[in-house]
Image (spheres, rainbow, N blue to C red):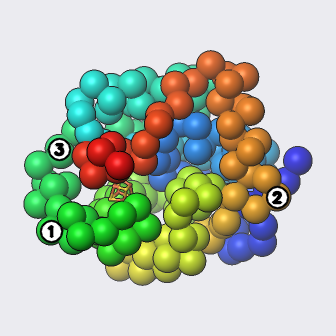
Amino acid sequence: MTTGGPGASPSRNSRVLLHVCCAPDATVPWPEMTAEGHEVDGFFFGSNIHPLGEWLLRRDAVLKLAGIIGAGVEITPYDPGSWSSAVARDRRASQEGGTGCAVCFDLQLSAAARFAAERGYDGLCTTLTISPHKDPGLINGIGARASARAGVTWIERVWRKRDGFKISVARSAEFGLYRQKYCGCVYSERR
Ligand code: SF4
């Protein structure tokens, strides 16, 4: 099954870094890009997640999925303080999908792009566009700019196309993955 729609993609056998916002959202992009012939490692940036116990649940789910796929994954250190100082001022005035989320996406994708450049990956993609609550155009634009700054190739995909989100829900259950009830930050938890 193919999801995600058309978009720039490196040739087969390329090393791709996949920014993983959470394990359930990665259950479509990760196996699909692997099936396309790429070597796909995950990159989990979770400093937006509140509280620590929730981060631990999501981190463990990402590690579990990486084990199922048989891929590598980088877990960045949990640093909610730096996330808050960068995002909180904007985020307080907005709901999910607002300006604070754009800052949050930029923090996550810039960190992933820097890591991809440092480790010599051929391309970078994100799982974020599988969400029906997020703007894929905004995410792909931020990802492309972050990748350009770092000097890596951005792979534009919209994973929610062709029932991507619905498939991810079914696969998460099949794999027995923890599935969160809110986006991640303290503001989304309170809604
Ligand atoms: S709602 Fe989600 S994307 Fe928006 S700021 Fe919070 S964690 Fe980030």
Q: Residue furthest front?
A: 191
Residue 83: name its quadrant.
Answer: bottom left
Residue at (71%, 73%) from the top-left corner? 7
**Disc 1, SS:** helix
Q: Is residue 99 left or right of residue 89?
A: right
Which dot marks residue 162?
2
Q: Determine crowd level at label 3: few under 14, some 14-19, many 20+ residues with C-alpha closer than 10 A.
A: some
Q: Disc 3 vs disc 2: which is toward the camera?
A: 2
Q: Is residue 90 left or right of residue 163?
A: left
Residue at (39%, 30%) from the top-left corner? 59
Nearest the viewer among 74 and 162 is 162
Nearest the viewer among 14 and 45 is 45
Q: Earlier in the sequence, mark 1 or mark 3?
A: 3
Nearest the viewer among 66 and 179 is 179
Q: Is residue 157 above or below residue 22?
A: below
Q: Earlier in the sequence, mark 3 or mark 2?
A: 3
Q: Is residue 57 left or right of residue 78?
A: right
Q: Are marks 2 and 1 in contact (CB under 8 Å)?
A: no
Q: Return the residue at label 3.
A: 79
Nearest the viewer among 36 and 168 is 168
